[in-house]
Structures are given as structure tokens and as C-alpha cells.
Amino acid sequence: MKPKLALVRADAAGHAAPACCPNCQVQAHGRFCSACGESIVVHAPTAYEFVHEFVGHFVALEGKLWNTLRLLVLKPGALTVDFLRGRRVPFVDPLRLYLTMSLILFALIKMVGVDLPQVFFEDKAYGVRYVHDLFNPDNPKKPRTVTLTLAVEEKAQGAPDSLFDALSLPDLIASLENVNAKWAHNVNRFMHMPPDERNAILNHGFLANLPYMLIGALPLFALYLKLMYLGSGRRYGDHLVFALHVSTFVFLLAGVMIVLPGNVAWLAAVSFSGAFRLISAWDCLQLVLVLWGAAYLVVALRRVYGGERWANNARALVLSTVHFSVIVTLVVAAELIPIFRHGG
């Protein structure tokens, strides 16, 4: 005969607690059933508990978040090692940690904004244009706006020097019409918009599309690791945990870079153009943070996978180069998608 549920005690908040588990009827000891894990405390959830439970499924809110972040930042790879060894209770689950940092990062992007180059198409040229605010010593409250253009221009006459010189915008649109006439129409429409409207469309596309693209790139990161360590005997899931932890650190680092002055993308664009006088000390600080991220990957790989130092460094170089190329491609695609889709 099953024992009856008798309310014999209450928890600290005064909620009734039965003598037996409400789920499996095993005699209760403590707050949770030792057999099935069911909560022993029986009460209707408050509004706060309901919201906390709902948000907690997607975002890490508990105090162990800070212990997780401390280990993640100060000991590259140690969090992955502990998780794969089975030490998981003190830390936030890798997926929840990743989602939490991604939500914080894109919230910062919306609040603070990101200074990125914009793709442009004109009658005789196409490429990227970077509008950047520089510190103005004469009027610190009013930054000096500088525009940097990296473009491929159509030659008026003569043979082209390269394949890129031979590609004119009308030719590109004509080729696009063979693929999708609506896309070609939308590109033409985009070209004739005022610059402010074009920038608004591109920025919206960046914010709307990039989060999904980064999540889609995460399994690729784990796949690169799987291919690099084929003989290690590790499963794909092990590599995915490492990818989640490293990506979380990158999101955390990117959030710091967004809050601080300077812009590493501007530094790269200026260095490519040769206008080094436009580089500020804050831009160089951003570069230091990027180098920290690169060193983090090297140390994390060494701690998790081991191996010879030279082989570890070579893998880190290949991994960062390939994944960085994928991310740059995704950023460009995030800005191109609204151009093709705008207008229906």
C-alpha cells in the first residue's frame, strides 16, 4: 500500500512540505527527492519564481555564473577540462553560458552601436566605405568625421589590370538577373537610395542576421577541431564544448571592446589603405585585446588537447585564420542579405 501524503513540515518560506515525494511516493528527506529529484516543497509558484524559471532556461542568472566566468577568463581551457571530467555542478552549462554572453553582446551592440564598414554600390565603383568619428582635440565634444573608401573602380578605357578591374557594376547586376531577377531589381533600387537610408538598411541587416549566422558557425568551429584532432579519440561533442567556451570568451572580449573607445576594424581598414595618421592610441588598445584573444586560444588548446608546442601553435594559427575568414564572410553576408531582399 502506498503511503499517504501527510503535510508534516514547512520550508523556510512557510510552504507545506509532504512527508513523501509527490511524484514517486518515496519517503522525503530534505528539499528534493533522493530517488527522482522532484522538489518536495508543494506550493503554487509566485510571479517572481515563474519569471526566474522562464528566463533561467535561456540565461544564466545564478551566483555560480561569476565563478564560471572567473575560471573561463583566468585559466583558458580549464573550464572545458573540468566539464569533460564530469565536474559540472559548480559551473553554468556551456550552452546556457554561450547564450547568456551572446544576449549581452548583442544588447550592447544595440545600445552602444558598432562602427563597421558599409558595402556600397555606385555607377562606376563598388566596395566598402567606412565613416568613423575621430577625437577632435580642438573640440572634444564634437568628433571629427572621417570617411575611408576602399573601392573597385571601373576603368573608362584600356585593358583591365586584373579581373576585379574588368568587373563593372552593370555587368554584375546583369549576371545577377540570370540568377534571380528580383535580387537584381532590389540591388538597383538600393543603389538609388539616399546614403542614410542605405546605411539604415545595412545596419538593420547586420543586427538581424548576424546572431543566427554566428550560432550557425559554432558547429563549424567544432568540426575544424574534429578534423585537426582526428587521432585524439575525442567525440564531436567534446569539441563542441570547447567551441562553446572559447566563443563565450570571444563574446565577453568583444563586449569589452564595444564599450571601450577605439575600433579594431577601423585600424585594419586604415592599415590597409596606408593612412596610418588616422590611428589612435585607443585603436592600438583594441589590437592588444585582439592579441589577447589569439593568445587565449593557444593556451586553451594546449590545456585541453595537449601535444607539442609547435604543433599546438600551428593548429591555433590555422583554426583562427579559417574561422576568422568565415566570420568576416558572415559579416559581409549579413549586410548583403538586406540589399537583395529589400523591397520584396
Image: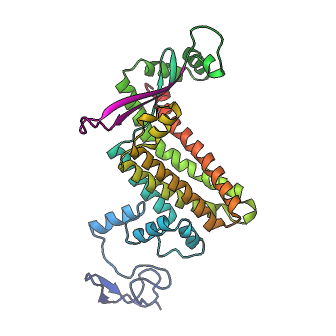
Q: Is residue 146 magenta?
A: yes
- Which residue is more in the foreground, 264 or 218? 264
Q: Which residues are magenta?
A: 127-152
Kindly identify the residue that appears in the image at 47 percent across and 92 percent down. Answer: 1
Kindly identify the residue that appears in the image at 41 percent across and 88 percent down. Answer: 20
Kindly identify the residue that appears in the image at 46 percent across and 43 percent down. Answer: 264
Q: Is residue 85 left or right of residue 20?
A: right
Q: Position of residue 335 (x, y in %)?
A: 47, 34
- Which residue is more in the foreground, 133 or 164? 133
Asked whether the viewer can see residue 82, the reply is yes
Choose top left, top right, bottom left or bottom right for residue 18.
bottom left
Asked whether the viewer can see residue 182, the reply is no
- Which residue is more in the foreground, 137 or 120? 137
Q: Position of residue 266 (x, y in %)?
A: 45, 38
Q: Position of residue 277 (x, y in %)?
A: 43, 34
On-image quarter of the C terminus: top left
Kindly identify the residue that appears in the image at 52 percent across and 68 percent down. Answer: 75
Q: Position of residue 319 (x, y in %)?
A: 63, 51
Choose top left, top right, bottom left or bottom right for residue 195.
top left
